[in-house]
Amino acid sequence: MNGARSLVRTLVDAGVEVCFANPGTSEMHFVSALDEIAGMRGVLGLFEGVVTGAADGYARMTDRPAATLLHCGPGLANGLANLHNASRAGVPIVNVVGDHAIYHKRLDAPLETDIDALAGTVSGWVRRSYRPQDVGADAADAVAAAQGPPGQIATLILPANVSWEDGGVPGSVRTPRPAARVPDAQVAAAAAALTSGEPAVLMLGGMAQRERGLRAASRIAVATGAQVSTQTHPARLQRGVGLPAFDRLPYFVEDAVAHLADNRHMILAGTAAPVAFFAYPDLPGSPTPQNCAVHELGAPGQDIVEALEHLADRVAPDTAPLLQAPTTPGPRAGALTTGAIAELVAAHLPEDAIVVDEAITAGVALAAASVGAPRHDWLCVTGGAIGYGLPTAVGAAVACPGRPVINLQADGSALYTIQALWTQARENLDVTTVLLNNHSYAILEVEMNRVLARSPGDKSRDLLSLTDPDIDFVKIANGLGIAATRATTAEELAGALRFATAEPGPHLIEAAYS
C-alpha cells in the first residue's frame, strides 16, 4: 500500500465521505486511490475557491469534515478566501495539499512555495508527512484536529514521493472528543446578571443558533426580559415557523450601537464580544456600551447548548419559549425592487430549505421577509470574504441531497467563483440561485459614502460599476450547463421561483433590479 492509498483508507475509516478537489500532477496518486478504495466521493471544482467553499458548506450542514485536494502552494492560495470564511465559521475541514517530492524541493521548481506558511494563516493544525509509513497516522490526527471542538481547518501537506512510495499503513481512527462542559460558576454568574434588574442582552453564536439553543434563549428572554441577538453573519442559523426568532446584530456599527445601547450586561453564549467589520472616522470599533459588563457563559468549544438549557432552568423553570407563527407575504406586481424580491423569495421558500446568503446589500430585507417562512437553515458569509455563496451552495447540496438549496447571490460576488455553477450542473445538485443583479458593487458605494462622507465621482464609479459591458448571467449559466432565466418584474420572478423550486436540479434566476 502506498502513502496515498493509506491516506484515503484512513479518511474513509474516519468518516470523511467526500473530497472536493482540483488536483494537479503532485496529487495523481491520491486521485488514483479513489478508484481503488471504496467509500469516498470525489467532486471536481474548476477553481480552488469553489473547492474550499464547497467543503465549508458541507461542514456547516453535517458538522463533520469533508476533504479538499489542492495542488501545491498556488492551489492552496487560490482557495484561501473561502478557507478564511470556514475558519471564522468554526467548521471542520481536512485540507490535503500536494507538494513536490522531497528530493525535488531543493531544485526550486516553478511551483515551489512555502505551503506551511500559507496554510498557517487559516489552519489550526498543519503537518507535513515525510514517510509513507506516517501518512495514515497523520491523516487520523488531521481528522481529529479538524473536529475539535471547536471545528477548525487541518492541513496535511503530502509530498509526491511520500504519496507514491510503498509502506503506507492506515491510521487508527479516534473518536471525537466531546465539547467541554461549562462550569456551574459561569452559569450562576450569567443568571445573576440576568436577574439583577438591569437591562441585559444575550449574544448567541455557534451551536446556540440551532433549535435547542434558540428555545433555551427564548425561555430566558420571556422570563427575564433580556434582549437576545444572534451573530451578524451566523455560520448556520435555524429559523422559520415553530422556532424562536431573534434579530441579528446589525452590520453597520452605528446601528449595532443603537441596538445594544440600553444594556448594562452582555452574556456571551458561544461567541466573542462583537466588533465592527471596519474602522470608520468618528465611530467606535465595538458596539458594546462602555458601561456594559461582559460575561462569558460559554466559549466556542464548550457545550454552549447544555449551558443555555441549565441557565434557562435556573431563571425560567416554568417558562415556555415564544415561537414564530407563519407569515405569508402578499402578492407583488410591477418592476422588481429589493423589497419585492425579498417577499417573493420568502413566499416561495420550500419546506426544509437551506438558504445560502451572499445577497450583500439585499440580505437584510431577505432575512426579514422570511422570518415566518417554512422552517429552514440560513448560512452566511461569516468571514466576510466574498465569492462564498455559489460554492457553499454546492457543499450544502452534496451534504443534504434531500433538501432544496436556495442561494441568494449578489452579482459582483458571484463573479469570484462563477465556476461553481458547472459543478452544480455536473453533480445535478438541487440548487436554485437567485442572482440579484443591480449591476454594481453596491455595498462599496455605500461604504465609500460612509468612509469619505461623500458620493463617488466618475472615476470612482467606474471601479464600482459592473456595466459597460453589462454581464449576461443567463448566458454564462447556460454555458456552464445550468437552466437559467431573467426576471425584471415581480410576476416573472414569481413564475420562475415556482418552476425552479418544483423542478429538482440546478437553476439560476437572474433578478434584475435597480
Image: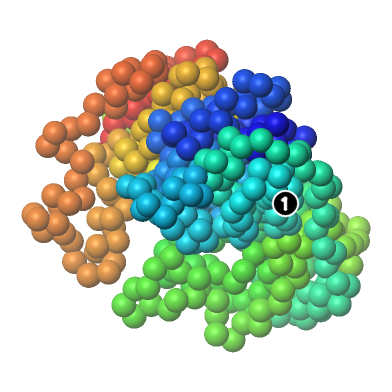
Q: Is residue 339 above or below residue 208?
A: above
Q: Position of residue 411 (x, y in %)?
A: 32, 38
Question: Residue 486 placed where, x, y %?
Answer: 31, 22
Identify residue type, mark 1: Asp
Q: Residue at x 66, y 35 (%)?
A: 166
Q: Is 35 rendered above or below residue 383? A: above
- Relative placement, left or right, of 348 versus 376 is left
Q: Is residue 205 left or right of residue 116?
A: right
Quarter occupied by the C terminus:
top left
- Visible in this render: residue 217? no
Q: Identify the residue at image location x=61%, y=37%.
A: 165
Percent x, y for residue 51? 49, 37
Q: Quadrant of residue 127?
A: bottom right
Q: Is residue 10 visible?
A: yes
Residue at image point 70% right, 54% down: 145
Q: Nearer the viewer, residue 419 or 203?
A: 419
Q: Secondary structure at mark 1?
A: helix
Q: Residue furthest left?
A: 458
Q: Nearer the viewer, residue 240 or 284?
A: 284
* Residue of label 1: 141
